[in-house]
Amino acid sequence: MPPADIEASAATQRVGASASPSPMIDPDSTKLRPGGPGYRRMSFALFSAGVATFALLYSTQALLPAISDDLGVTPGQASWTVSAATGALALAVLPLSALSERFGRRAMMTASLVVAALASLVVPFAPDLGWLIALRAVQGLALAGLPASAMAFLAEEVRPKALVAAIGLFVAGNSIGGMSGRIVTGWVAQAWGWRAALGAVGVLAVLCAVVFQLMIPKARHFTPGSISPRALARTVGGHLSDPLLRRLYAIGALFMTVFGAVYTVIGYRLVEAPFNLPQGVVGSIFLIYLVGTLSSAAAGRLVARLGRRGALYGAVGTTTAGLLLSLADSLPAVLAGLVLITAGFFAGHAVASSSVSRAAKTGRAQASALYQTAYYLGSSIGGTVGALAFHAAGWTGTVVLGLVAVLSAAAITLYATRKALAERRAESQAAAAAATARTRTSRAMAVRV
């Protein structure tokens, strides 16, 4: 039995065992399941947390053209209001996930939401770009305690067969938050300016935090552990030495590079010729996030039909088709391209993130935290480099960046597929050789008799 440090999975097994009235009872039987008591409240609470996370994290993304005009800065400079938040989250998610091992997933998620929501009420009063970027970094730091803790909470409290669907609902909340935040900011900014728009998102986040606190059920399968730096380093090193987890981290980062680049730059493209759309209409473009809600929630069925690697191939193909379609100077084609990019991204993210929770046998919070680190670093890189590419080569430059990232994700998945086939072939050959050896032995014994 491993020591009770940050080994969340082992702690979960101990709690399940101690809570069971009989050694014959499966610990998973006491976990939440669809249709069971507490599952709906848990889903609604984490859905609300997902809404607040993406609404706050990307609250300036649809406002970048307005921020550039008002503060007199370039798209690359304005993009730092997004990258500062995602980058700070990426840096802080691992240490805060370690704290969740000591103080609990529920407590960490609550604290993160409250601090981020309160900070969002200050952001609209930033006097210049420097202050705005700094406050956005504070928001990112606060939100860092939520994503990995949410994944670990689900892995511990939900039955394994329902885990992909449960995580899909959390990711669906991300998509709703990303959509609603951008729509609200777009129309409010058109009427009253970008500062009022950021204030409106802050009010939405406060409401989500209240709903989360009222609805989230108590954790039943969590045991506090220590937060020894040595134990943390050992757990993180173990995850980073796992080839499967490394591939999943890279895939998450690459998908998010595409998504961050596209949605950071799309506002600049649509307010310029030949589209010339007003800010409110540009914000409404993010209704397309509803497609992500559906595709992430359906990820479980997609995996059941195609397998995890098959689902990733489907996500890659869908995203690639969307990028190519978006090159046309036609609004319907651009919108169709965004639909495909969004569907492919959210499906790929749901499959990769749930695969991390499934693959990690110990230290699940740290495994999820490393995924979130890679994921949001991808967002930061995609947003900043995508804006630079747009400034240098227009929308074509952003699309080229996206294609490089998504095809790299395809190459990693193909490598994993070929490796799995080679392993199966080797196992089959070994089994055949063993069967042949057994047959020869049997014949030799029969001859002796």
Image: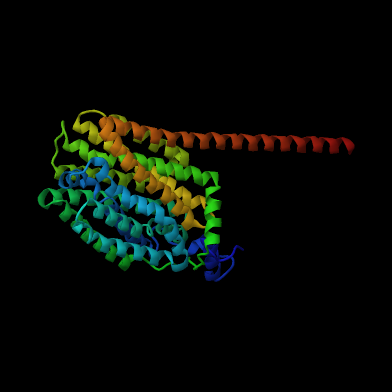
Between 157 and 55, which is closer to the camera in this rendering?
55
Q: Quadrant of residue 73?
A: top left
| Residue 422 percent location from the top left of the image | 59, 34
x and y percentages locating residue 178 in the rendered image: 27, 49
One can see residue 320 in this view: no
Q: Residue at x 20, y 53 (%)?
A: 128
Looking at the image, residue 348 sits to the left or right of residue 2; the answer is left
Q: Is residue 93 above or below residue 293?
A: below
Query: Could you tell me if residue 443 is visible in this image?
Result: yes
Q: In this figure, which colouring scheme has been used for the structure?
A: rainbow
Q: Which residue reaches farthest left?
A: 191
Quarter location, residue 273: top left
Residue at image location 23% in from the left, 33% down from the top: 334
Quarter of the picture containing the C terminus is top right
* In the depicted structure, whether residue 422 falls above or below residue 280: above
**On the picture, is 424 further left or further right than 174?**
right
Horizontal and vertical percent position of residue 7 = 53, 61
The number of discs equals 0
Left or right: where 372 falls relative to 360: left
**Residue 154 in the figure: left or right of residue 131:** right
Q: Quadrant of the N terminus?
A: bottom right
Residue 330, placed above or below residue 378: above
Query: Percent position (x, y) of residue 151?
Result: 42, 56
Residue sitting at the far top = 328
Tell me the residue at 20%/48% (across/down).
Answer: 183
